[in-house]
Image (cartoon, helix red, strand yellow):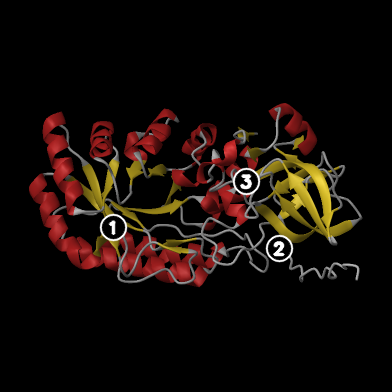
Amino acid sequence: MAFEAPPYLPPQVLPHAPMHQFSVAFGELQVGGLPLTQLAARVGQTPFYAYDRTLLRERVAALRHALPRSIQLHYALKANPMPALVGLMATLVDGIDVASGGELKTALDAGASPQAVSFAGPGKRDAELRQAVAAGVLVNIESEREVQILERHCDALALSARVAVRVNPDFELKGSGMKMGGGSKPFGVDVERVPQLLQHIQRAGLDFEGFHLYAGSQNLHAQAICEAQQQSYALALRLAEHAHAPVRTLNLGGGFGIPYFPGEERLDLAPIGANLAQLAERAVHELPGAALVLELGRYLVGEAGIYVTRVLDRKVSRGQVFLVCDGGLHQHLAASGHFGQVLRKNYPVAIGNRMDAGATEVASLVGPLCTPLDLLADHMALAVAEPGDLAVVFQSGAYGASASPQQFLGHPPCVEVLV
């Protein structure tokens, strides 16, 4: 009896939010004013990440327009630490938030003022805290241990440490992709322990400036973000009563999400702007002289970046089309579904040099690695592609190259460009 392969039945293909931030001309995606094939030639290799300067500027400008003028915008460098991009962002925002000594160096090298840099992270090393004191940046304290170390370095360096308290609140950001506050968390100081910590900060002679609250990230629900901001503000007011100095900065966190997956819609900024306007008006009287800060990472840079990989081979296995590319999970772990997804979903993907192609097919985009985990797109409707074509993964400006295991299986590292 002859073997017969079972019929291939593709799953339902759901639509993504439209990716209109990059224009299309003559069938090619345009990035930084360049056709994709020309950009690839200029870069000199694939795969690569490309970030569009104009889109970065437009995103910051759109936020400035939607939010009260008094709200300060900080860029969370962990979203994308590419030095050229950080240098640009330092000219567009009011401050940079870092999470390691290495990121601190990147921010300062990029031209950020130490007065505008804050340093968070639950596991700051002794040497990193010494760096922070010497640089004069704001340290978001996350434990009693950090107070003790900072006091010692202040004495040794004859300098005063600028500090804020990162608070682990008694609430969560509803609907967030990653919850970083509320319940038992390694981040910050539990709210009930903050009054005691403030006394320790005063005894140590540290320069207290305010509070940092970050309840969660990647949230597309404006109402949930507004509620978290209101709760954070109210909590800061209560804690300020225990502080020996007035609050000069209140970091309300961020949490603004971008649409990655089918069915998701872009965040509505209008209610957030109205909510922050009310809080800013209250702060004039209730926290006089305090700056209200939003700390945003992926929302500022995520939609301005793409990952580009070249199709090496086209294979059909029992009716399923596989486009085998020179890039994969080792360079874009998030798109492969292994950076926090519980159930794998596709990022928006297109064949960037065939944007006006009439013929489409359901295909899977896979990388060169010898593992079935190396999957960038699973059963997506794409233009019919051949070896040499350029596949593009959108929404790749945040948590891309630096969040991926680039040494895995010994493939060459990717390039990043700002255009």
Badge 1 marks a residue whose secondary structure is loop
Tell me the element at label 3: helix
Task: Give the residue number, with chain letter if any, for mark 2.
Answer: 16
In-image side of 295 versus 286 (left or right): right
Q: CA distance from mark 1 to mark 2?
A: 36 Å
Q: CA distance from mark 3 to mark 1?
A: 31 Å
Q: Residue at x 55, y 56 (%)?
A: 338
Q: CA distance from mark 3 to mark 2?
A: 17 Å
Residue drawn at x 38%, y 70% is 172
Q: At which x and y percent is residue 96?
A: 41, 42
* Vertical relation: 403 (above or below) 66: above
In the image, is residue 51 above or below residue 241?
Answer: above
**Which residue carries the number 1 mark?**
188
Q: Amino acid at mark 1?
A: Gly
* Vertical placement of residue 38 versus 98, above or below: above
Circle 3 residues within 10 Å: few <14, some 14–19, many ≥20? many
10 Å crowding of disc 1: few (<14), some (14-19), many (20+): many
The kind of residue tagged 2 is His
Considering only order in the chain, which callout, 2 or 3, is on the residue closer to the N terminus?
2
